[in-house]
Image (tube, rainbow, N blue to C red):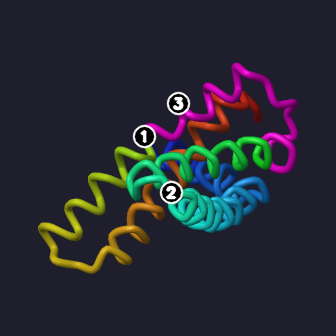
Amino acid sequence: MGVTAIREVILKIKRTFVDKRFIAFCALGVINTLNDAIFSSIYHRLGLQDNVAAVVGYYTALTIAFFLSSYFIFKKTPSLKRYVRFFVSYIPNFIIFFLVTFITINTMNLPQFWGTILAAMVGGPVTFIIMKIYTFKGK
């Protein structure tokens, strides 16, 4: 791989991540995390068991994130096909989250907070690329 090829790869990475859509995606991630915590808590207070409340809260937060991503980040009309693809695009993120937090907590003996931060730093860009290419098929 020559210098020109390396330069092209660096420019492509820069165009992908130094972008207002990626920054908006990161901001939406913060909102989504808050929504997840709030809705999980509400569902638990309504009587759902902890794990069930967490799953239903996660689903609710991702549904809200889908509509916000559609309208504000990718400027695409929501559809059932995009909705399904949106959820599929989060499968790698979940796997990354699980593996990174498992390793940092159980192998490196770090607090869960740091495992979650590291997982978000790795999983966020991967999810953004998948959503951009697969879910919203855009530039």
Q: Tags 3 and 1 in contact by the CB under 8 Å rule?
A: no
Residue 112, placed above or below residue 1: below
Q: Amino acid at mark 3?
A: Val
The answer to whether 99 appears left or right of 116 in the picture is left
What percent of the width, then of the height, locates residue 128? 60, 46
Q: Which residue is mark 2?
A: 47
Question: What residue lies at 56% left-to-right and 53% top-to-bottom?
Answer: 57
Amino acid, disc 2: Gly
- Could you tell me the amino acid type at mark 1? Pro
In percent of the image, x 78 and y 42: which residue is there? 67
**Which residue does the numbered mark 1 point to in the structure image?**
92
* Tag shown at residue 88: 3
Rendered location of residue 137, percent (x, y):
72, 28
Magenta residue check for 88: yes
Where is residue 2 shown, x and y percent of the image?
44, 43
In the displayed structure, 100 sits above or below 65; it is: below
Q: Is residue 39 left or right of residue 119?
A: right
Gap between marks 1 and 2 measured at Cα: 31 Å
* Whole-number angstrom distance, CA of label 3 to CA of label 1: 8 Å
Circle nearer the viewer, 1 or 2 = 2
The span picked out in magenta is: 70-91
Give how far apart the Cα atoms at labels 3 and 2 are: 29 Å
Question: Percent x, y for residue 107?
Answer: 12, 68
Quadrant of the rendered structure where residue 109 is? Answer: bottom left
- Residues packed near mark 1 inside 10 Å, few (<14), some (14 to 19) or many (20 plus): some
Q: Secondary structure at mark 2?
A: loop
- 42 vs 28, left or right, is left
Disc 2 packing (10 Å; few <14; some 14–19; many ≥20): few
**Comes first in the chain, label 3 or label 2:** 2
Give the prevailing secondary structure in the magenta stretch.
helix
In the rendered image, which quarter contains the N terminus? top left
In this orientation, which residue lies closer to the viewer: 68 or 137?
Answer: 68
